[in-house]
Image (cartoon, helix red, strand yellow):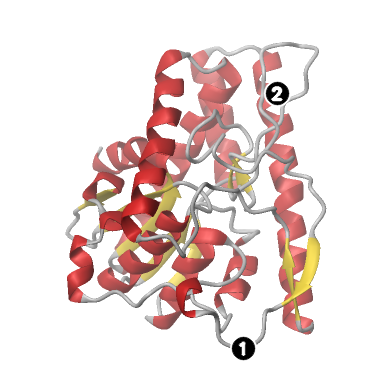
Amino acid sequence: MPSLDDAPEPTDDPGVGSADPVRPSDALESPGPSGPVDPTGSADSEPSAAPEPNGSPEPNDATPEPRDEDADDPRLSDEYLRTVAHPDGDVTLVGVVHDHPASVFRARAVVRDRDPETVALEVPPLATPLYRTYARSDRTPPAFGGEMSAAAQAGRECDADVVGVDGPTGGFFARLARNWWRDGASPGTLRRVASGVASVTRHALTCRVAAAVARRTALRVEVDDPVAHDCTRADPPAVQASDERAQARRSQSLLRAFDPPRPVALRDETREEHMAGELASLRERGDTVAVVGLDHLDAVAERLRE
C-alpha cells in the first residue's frame, strides 16, 4: 500500500538516506503494526501484474458477512476501535495491522455495520483509485490490497464515498513545513523527511498508473508484496485475533523502549495531524469510518477530539 509508513526509514545519520515503507502510509514511520509490521520492501518496489482470480473463492477464503452474533467475534474487539462523536457526524477509527487477516475482517465488518457516508483510508489520494479498483473484485475480501481494499469494497456495497486521507498532498507539505519551523528542527531533518516523502510519492504514482491499467485491461496489478503473517483467513477467529494481538504488543513494546529519531517523529506527527484534519472535514458530510495503522489510532483520535 502506498504509505508514508512504507517509505525508507529516515535516520539521523547524515550518511544514510531516508526511506519509509509504503503501505499507503509511512514513508517515515517507525516499527509497529502500521510500520515495521508493514512491508519491508522499499516504496519504490516494482509492481507485478496478475489476472484477477476467476470463479468463486473457496469457502474458507471468504470473509463471512457480518451478522448480529459477530458482536462476539474476537476480531471485533473494542481495543482496536475508537469513535469520536460530533454533531455533524461521528468518526469511527479502525486500527489495523497491515494485511493481517483479523484486520482485514475487522475493516470490512465495521464499515458494513456502521454504513457510513464516507470510508477513509490511510493512503494518499493519488493512490486511492487502485484500492477502489481492487474493491470491484467478485472475491470477498478482494485478492489484493489487504484491509484497505476490504474496507473500500464494503464502502462500495453501502454506496459510501471511498477517499484517501494520508500524505503526501499539498496540505501535508504545508503542515510539514510549519511543524519543522515551529520545532526549530535542522535542515538535515527536513531533508531526510522530504526524501522519504518523495519515495512515497513515487510509489503513489505507480499505484495511480496501476489503477489506469486495471481499468483498461483484465489485469489487476499488485504493487506491494503482502505482509506475511503466522495465520490466514482459514484459521479460526480466535487464532487470528490472538496472533494480531501478539504482533501489536510486540510493536508497542518496541516503540516504548526507544525514542524515535527526530525525522520519524516529525513525519509521524505531521501525518497524524494531517489525517485528523482531513477526517474533521469529512465528518461534515456525515458519519465516517477511517482505517488506520494501529500505531496512529490513539494519536489521530486525540487530535480529532481537540
Distance (Cα) linking label 2 and label 1: 46 Å
Report the mark closest to the observer, 2 or 1.
Answer: 1
- Residue 18 occupies quadrant: top right
Note whether 201 is above or below 207 in the view shown.
Answer: above
Check disc 2 and give the amino acid type: Arg
Q: Secondary structure at mark 2?
A: helix
Check disc 1 and give the amino acid type: Gly
Residue 302 horizontal side relative to residue 10, left or right: left
Circle 1 residues within 10 Å: few <14, some 14–19, many ≥20: few
Q: Does any portion of residue 152 appear in the rendered image?
A: yes
Circle 2 residues within 10 Å: few <14, some 14–19, many ≥20: many
Residue 105 horizontal side relative to residue 122, left or right: left
Q: Does any portion of residue 94 appear in the rendered image?
A: no
Q: Earlier in the sequence, mark 2 or mark 1?
A: 1
Residue at point 37%, 32% (across, down): 249
Note whether 259 is above or below 40 in the view shown.
Answer: above
Q: Of the numbered discs in the image, which one, if any, rests on residue 154? A: none
Q: Position of residue 50 (x, y in %)?
A: 77, 72
Q: Secondary structure at mark 1?
A: loop
Q: Position of residue 213 (x, y in %)?
A: 79, 74
Note whether 229 is above or below 19 in the view shown.
Answer: below
Residue on which the image places disc 1: 55
Front residue (pair 82, 243): 243
Residue 293 horizontal side relative to residue 221, left or right: left
Q: Which residue is at the far bottom?
A: 55
Q: Of the numbered discs in the image, which one, if any, rests on residue 192? A: 2
